[in-house]
Structure formats: C-alpha cells, structure tokens
Image: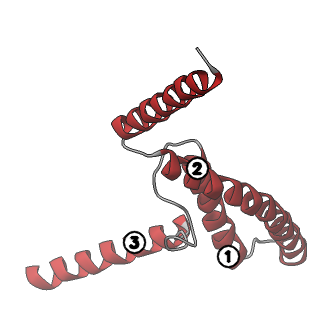
Amino acid sequence: MGKKGEKAVEQAEEKSEDKSTETTASAEGESTAQVLLRGAYMVLFVIITRLAEFVIAGAALVQLGYKLATKKPNDRVTAFGDSLTQFVAQIVRFQTFNSEEKPFPFQAWPTPATAKAADEQSSTTDTDSTEKTQAA
C-alpha cells in the first residue's frame, strides 16, 4: 500500500475510534463535551474549596475570640460555619460524581441546620397551638 492508502486507513481507524468513544459516552448518557465541561466546573470548585479553607480559618479565629471574650459562641458565626460546611460537602459530592447538582452559585446557599431546626420547632409550636385552639 502507498502512503495515501496508509493515511486513509489511519483516518478511518481514527474515525471509528471517535465514533466508539461517542457511542460509549452516549450510552452512559453524557457526551465527551459534557464530561469535559463538568471537569472545568470541578477545577473551578477546587479553587473555591481552597478559598473556603481561608474563610473557615477566619471564622474559627473570630469564633475563638468571641468565645474568649463572652464565654459563649456567636450564633451568627455558628450558623455561617454550618452553612459553609454544607457548601463544602456539596462541592465534594459534585466532584466525586455523587451528585449532578452544581453547588452555590448554581443553586441557593445552604441553610444552616440551626435555622432548619428553628423552623421545624416553630412549625411544631404552631401546630401545637392550632391543636390546642381546636380542642378548646
């Protein structure tokens, strides 16, 4: 075979490899472009995670100073620390393919568990007061 024939065979092999790669990706539900885009988001979230470490350190120092001064932790810093913890956990779940949802800023900032508990407690209190009113 001449050089032209060899090049034609190589190009045909490359095309068939490309098609098999696309078929495999399509069979799994994601194209190569989608996976590469996710990879770009993953790199972005690695950088955001590193920045979050500095924020965590700052919050810890503020909380320590507040605790030393007042003998109790600051509720706002505690709530922020909880939501920041959830944010970092969302990033890890996304990066390890345990979740398809991209974290903040692509969705709402996580609600601190302390706020969730307060909401649940107030809804329970509202339900109890409604039940008492109906019973009377």
Q: State how far apart marks 2 and 3 are (Cα).
A: 44 Å
Residue type at mark 3?
Answer: Gln
- According to the picture, the residue beneath numbered tag 1 turns out to be 75
Residue at image coords 16%, 77% = 131
Q: Is residue 58 visible?
A: yes
Q: Nearer the viewer, residue 129 or 93?
A: 93
> What is the number of callouts on the image?
3
Residue at image coords 38%, 35% = 23
Label 1 Cα neighbours within 10 Å, binned few <14 / some 14-19 / many ≥20: few
Res. 3 mark: none
Residue 119, how many percent across, how many down?
41, 75
- According to the picture, the residue beneath numbered tag 2 turns out to be 36
Which image quarter holds the C terminus? bottom left
Q: Which residue of the protein is positioned furthest toward the front in this rendering?
A: 2
- According to the picture, the residue beneath numbered tag 3 turns out to be 121
Mark 3 in CB contact with mark 1 (< 8 angstroms): no
Q: State how far apart marks 3 and 1 are (Cα).
A: 17 Å
Label 2 Cα neighbours within 10 Å, binned few <14 / some 14-19 / many ≥20: few
Residue 91, how many percent across, how many down?
61, 55
